[in-house]
Every structure is written in structure tokens, then in C-alpha cells.
Amino acid sequence: MISIWLIPGIIVTILIAATVKRVPSYEVFVEGSKEGIQIAISLLPFLLGMMVSIAIFQASGAMGAILSFFQPFMTAIGVPADILPLALIRPISGTAALSVTTELIKTHGPDSFIGQLASVMQGSTDTTLYIITVYFGAVGIKRMGDALKVGLLADLAGIIASVIIVIILFH
């Protein structure tokens, strides 16, 4: 019940506070919307570049080559190789990763080891390359090497932690 009323409650609280402070809330909202549209327009080139890069990566066969290279290692450590596409695509694209997760759950079932691992991995990692490309590009940051390293290390830690946690809790 709390979750149903939380957002409307926040909105009403903001409107009451604006009225008490005599802030023209509608005009401020419209100005914020204008700024949001400008930001969205400035992000479009970076989004387009990222989407084209992902499409080229997948169409080139690079994903298949990487999967076949790592498959023996994955099998040796007892982790299904079916999860590898999700681990590789998640730092690049959230939408593509969600598509991979959906397909894994549809194929193997939500209560299977792969389904549980895909779900935990989806929530334990982030779209590092997307974030760095779009948001750093939008604000004009040119040197992003350290952020990229830390972000990819955090993704790797999330992937490893998700495998360990799912093995401990569900396997």
C-alpha cells in the first residue's frame, strides 16, 4: 500500500512546499521540461553512435568468436556457457542485455540455475560503456580511461559475485 501512495505523496508534498514558498510550480516545471528536451537532443549523437557500434559488434561475428574462446573455461569452472553472452553484453547495452536475459529465462525457465543467474547478473552489473559514452560525452569529458577501468572492474566483480551468490543460494 505504501508503494502505491509514495510517488503521489511526494508530488503533493512538492506542490504544497512550492505553494508555501510562493514558487510558480507550473512555470518551473515547464522550464525543467525545456532543459530536459535540450539534454535529450544533445544525447542523441552519442546514443546513435553506441547503437551502431553494438550492431556492428554483433553482426561482425565477434561475439561468437569470444564465446567460443571462453566456452571451455566456463565449462571447466562449472558455469554454463549460455550465460556468457549476458556477461559480455551487459556492460555495453542494457536493452541488449535485457533481451539476452529474457531469452535465457524463456529457454531455460525462471527457476533454473541459468534463469536465476541471469536475473542476479542483470541486477548486479551496469551498462558501463553506455554510461561513459553517453553521459561523459554529453558533458564534454574527453579523458575517461580511469572511469572505464573502474566501471569494467565493478562489472567483473558483479558478474563473479552473482555467480558465487547463485551457486551458494540456489544450487
Image (cartoon, helix red, strand yellow):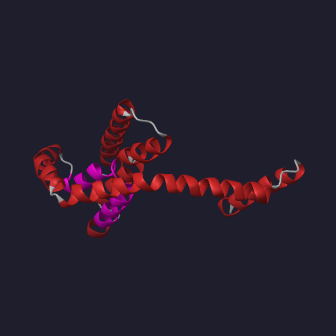
Depth check, front residue: 131 or 111: 131
Residue plotted at (36% across, 36% down): 148
Name the main secondary structure of what is drawn in magenta.
helix
User: Residue 17: in sight, yes or no?
Assistant: yes
Where's the N terminus, which quadrant? Answer: bottom right
User: For the image shown, how many numbered marks are present on the structure?
Assistant: 0
User: Residue 113: in sight, yes or no?
Assistant: no
The answer to whether 7 appears left or right of 101 in the picture is: right
The answer to whether 41 appears left or right of 156 in the picture is: right
The answer to whether 56 appears left or right of 34 in the picture is: left
Q: Is residue 104 inside the magenta stretch? A: yes
Q: Is residue 108 inside the magenta stretch? A: no
Depth check, front residue: 21 or 12: 21
Residue plotted at (78% across, 53% down): 14
The answer to whether 6 appears left or right of 88 in the picture is: right
Depth check, front residue: 92 or 110: 92
Instruction: State the image quarter where residue 7 is shown.
Output: bottom right
Residue plotted at (33% across, 35% down): 153
Residue 105 point in image, percent of width and height: 32, 65
The correct choice, above or below, for 34 with respect to 129 in the image is: below
Residue 107 point in image, percent of width and height: 26, 69
Residue 12 point in image, percent of width and height: 78, 58
The magenta-colored residue range is 80-105
Residue sitting farthest toward the top: 146
The correct choice, above or below, for 149 with respect to 111 in the image is: above
Depth check, front residue: 80 or 38: 38
Residue 28 point in image, percent of width and height: 75, 54
